[in-house]
Amino acid sequence: MVIGKYRTQLWDKQSSAFLPATPGLGMHVEIKDPDTKVILSRQYGSDGRFTFTSHTPGEHQICLHSNSTKMALFAGGKLRVHLDIQVGEHTNNYPEIAAKDKLTEVELRLRQLLDQVEQIQKEQNYQRYREERFRGTSESTNQRVLWWSIAQTLILMITGIWQMKHLKSFFEAKKLV
């Protein structure tokens, strides 16, 4: 699970500082997984929070687009976006969970440890996936190198045999042998 929070600020020429954005300014958030499939595409306000879960391991793209470039140009052309992204177990608000489920301190700590173990398992599975991909790439490269060296050796041998026959016929024609 990934939680993203953002807020925007517009440049104000008069005060020479960034001020909170006007309510009319919004942001379009688009999130793509490693296969470039769109996971989330939604319009938000000048401040917002988005959440998504992806079952595909790898690098995800998070794109934030201003919905109104005209407003940014009128404000001096500068737009600042503060972005906070929380991934995995860091997305859980444990004090809120404890209050909601009426957990004791030991039960809350146990839940935190279980979440950490789950996160470690996910990380291990991702590392196994990466190792599997890397191993496949390495084996493919090794196989290509092997076939390339065999092809080079055959070409070298064929060239050598051709040269020997050519030289033999040359010397026979000149009656040196």
Image (tube, rainbow, N blue to C red):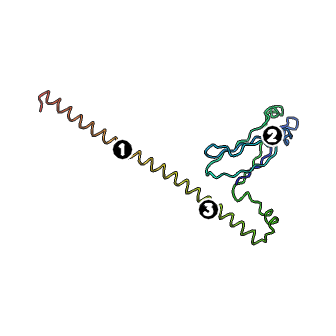
What residue sits 86% from the left and 41% below the top?
23
Q: Position of residue 165 (x, y in %)?
A: 20, 34
Amino acid found under the numbered disc labelled 2: Gly
What residue sits 48% from the left and 48% below the top?
137
Q: Report the front residue among 122 and 11.
A: 122
Q: Report the front residue among 2 and 160.
A: 2
126 vs 147, left or right, is right
- Whole-number angstrom distance, CA of label 3 to CA of label 2: 38 Å
Q: Position of residue 140 (x, y in %)?
A: 45, 48
- Whole-number angstrom distance, CA of label 2 to CA of label 1: 59 Å
Amino acid found under the numbered disc labelled 1: Ser
Disc number placed over residue 104 in the picture, else none = none
Could you tell me if the residues under marks 1 and 3 are in contact, i.e. CB atoms within 8 Å?
Answer: no
What residue sits 81% from the left and 45% below the top?
47
Q: Position of residue 59 (x, y in %)?
A: 63, 48
Classify 10 Å Cα crowding around label 2: few (below 14), some (14-19), many (20 and above): many
Q: Quadrant of the C terminus?
A: top left
Q: Quadrant of the N terminus?
A: bottom right
Residue beneath label 1, please? 149
Mark 3 and mark 2 lie on one chain; the one further toward the N terminus is 2
159 vs 102, left or right, is left
Residue beneath label 2, please? 26
Mark 2 and mark 1 lie on one chain; the one further toward the N terminus is 2
Residue beneath label 3, please? 121
Q: Report the front residue among 164 and 50.
A: 50
> Which mark is nearer the camera, 1 or 3?
3
What residue sits 11% from the left and 28% below the top?
175
